[in-house]
Amino acid sequence: MQYQVFIIAVLLLVLFQKSIGQDSKNNSEMVIENFQKEFHLDWRIVNDGVMGGLSSSKIEIHAEGQAKFSGRVSLENYGGFASIRGLISGEKLVGIRKIEIRVKGDGKKYDFRIRTNNRFDRVSYKLEFQTKKNQWTTHEFLLSEFVPTFRGRILKNIPPIEASEIKQVGILIAGKQEGYFELILDYLKGTFKVEEKAIK
């Protein structure tokens, strides 16, 4: 009887330690969006039509559990950009230091953008990433490295991003890349711990 109790106690201890280890692993990052059946975030389309342009875009979920951001960039009427924005509460992101995305690209360049407000015409923090045509690539963005911009101009003396203040995350295509574009999105996730060597 004592032997059976001892065995059960050992098994419970192993399960407990495994659970703690798993929780520790899970707590090192969080899923922001994984496009499984439905959107986690409230995604909005914001194209150059707000300024009189003619570009178009859409975001839709695939059956495979991914999303497609696609459309056409037009340079007519002084336009030239298309974007998606996901609204999120910064309270959910408290403590994150990096955002990672996995995408299948079309060979074009995109901006990953963060806003700390829900207004259209305000400061936007950005980092550019290059895609490879028909290939999956992973891109990591340290919050400390985002560049503040306003209407295409880089701003100075703007405080760095605080995760708790993030109101929007998004992807934008511009840079006079006229024509059709397509970007498959697999996930967005936040990371709480960052290796020191990764911090500049």
Image (cartoon, grey):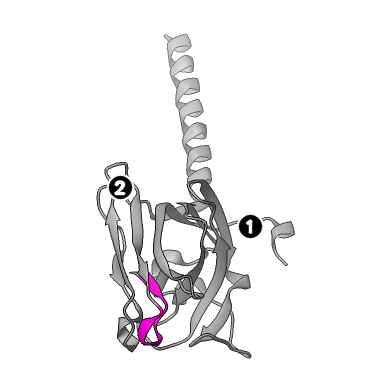
Q: Which of marks 2 and 1 is nearer the N terminus?
A: 2
Task: Assess whether residue 37 is covered by the magenta stretch.
Answer: no
The amino acid beneath tag 1 is Val
Give the answer, above or below, for where 76 lies relative to 141.
below
Give the magenta part as a residue range.
75-84
Give percent across and percent down for residue 122: 43, 88
Q: Which amino acid does label 2 sit on?
A: Gln
- Crowding around mark 1 (Cα neighbors within 10 Å: few <14, some 14 to 19, many 20+) is few
Q: Is residue 80 magenta?
A: yes
The Cα atoms of the two marked residues, 2 and 1, are separated by 27 Å
* Residue at the image position 49 percent from the left and 39 percent from the top: 22
Element at label 2: loop
Q: Which residue does the numbered mark 1 point to in the structure image?
A: 194
Residue 164 placement, left or right of 49: right
Q: Which of label 2 and label 1 is nearer to you?
A: 2
Which residue has dot 2 on it?
36
Residue in the image at 26% along x and 43% along y: 63
Instruction: Name which residue lies at 48% across and 10% down.
Output: 3
